Image (cartoon, helix red, strand yellow):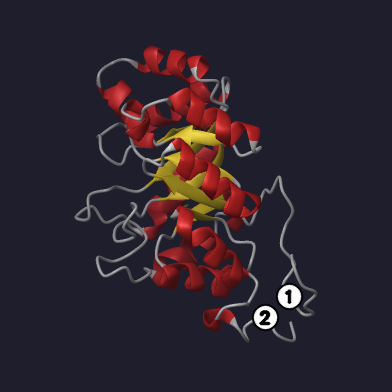
Amino acid sequence: MNFKLNDLPERSIKPRQKGLTMVMDKGLSLRQVEDFLDVAGVHTDIVKLGWSTSHVTPRLKEKLELYRSAGIPTYFGGTLFEAFTVRNQFEDYQRVLDEYGMEYAEVSDGSMDIEHDIKCDYIRKLSKQVTVISEVGSKDATKIFAPYKWIKLMQAEIEAGSWKVIAEAREGGNVGIYRGTGEVREGLVDEILTQIPSERIIWEAPQKEQQVWFIKLIGSNVNLGNIAPAEVIPLETIRLGLRGDTFDFFLGK
């Protein structure tokens, strides 16, 4: 921090277990990654190479090394796991993780249909190889899960070995835990939090209004994901009450 300001909320310290900022890299160049890390690396906890972009990203190993040298873990989006798995290439996927030195992996079923017991088996298998982040919720806006089902799925995946569970919203923030307008399904979130500890969940929140809502509900150290690289610094100011949206929210607390 560049200045001394009193009455700021206390942020957790890296490596964090809560208060994570997960950034979505949708195809940054090496130079863009360098610039991003120079400005926002200190506030970034983990980077997802969105969906299957890693399959078509040039100089992928060099990009991963840039993040690694900055001490920021990376992982391939869950859609890549699904792309391998739906083609009966799960073992090939495991070899790819090893080839690229990946320490994290995402297991999701947002684009493919898979029995949940089988998904949990994949989580168990991968958790012996890497740290697993699993995603709950569908990318199909017509698939609406009842709160009890979200809870059941999240509990099962945590028990299977997931370090964190992601609440699906896509990069647009308009499915899963959100309505098509981007509005939070507040009742759903409240129900989930009665059973699942907030520090175990990464809430995908690409829109500023969504970030503000979760920070006001859970606090500065809520885990937020699918943050655009250019929005990391703005998000950190929201977490600290240094932007109009949360300016007086933390004062006197």
Left or right: where 10 falls relative to 124:
right
Q: Residue furthest left?
A: 142
Element type at marker 2? Answer: loop
Give the residue at x 72% y 57%: 12
The CA span between labels 1 and 2 is 7 Å
Locate residue 191, reporting x and y percent.
47, 64
What residue sits 74% from the left and 67% below the top?
Answer: 2
Left or right of 116: which side holds 158? right
Q: Name the residue tied to disc 1.
A: 8
Question: Cβ–Cβ below 8 Å for labels 1 and 2?
Answer: yes
Tag on residue 247?
none
Which kind of residue does numbered mark 1 sit on? Leu
Asked if one can make out residue 44 in the rendered structure from this viewpoint, the answer is no
Q: Between residues 146 and 214, which one lies in front from this camera angle?
A: 214
Q: Residues within 10 Å of mark 2 (few under 14, many from 20)?
A: some
What amino acid type should be assigned to the residue bearing mark 2?
Answer: Phe
Viewer-closest of 246 and 29: 29
Q: Is residue 39 visible?
A: yes
Secondary element under disc 1, as helix, strand or loop, is loop
* 146, 19: nearer the viewer: 19
Q: Quadrant of the N terminus?
A: bottom right
Quarter of the image with the C terminus is: bottom right
- Circle 2 residue: 250
Q: Residue at x 37, y 60 (%)?
A: 177
Measured as percent of width and height from the top left, residue 192 is found at: 48, 59
Residue 186: percent from the left, percent from the top? 41, 71
The outermost residue toward the front is 31
Which of the two residues, 81 or 121, is positioned nearer the viewer here? Answer: 81
What's the residue at 34%, 53% (across, down)? Answer: 171
- For label 1, the crowd category at 10 Å Cα-Cα, with few meaning under 14, some 14 to 19 and many 20 or more, is some
> Residue 99 at x, y = what percent?
49, 14
Q: Quadrant of residue 71?
A: top right
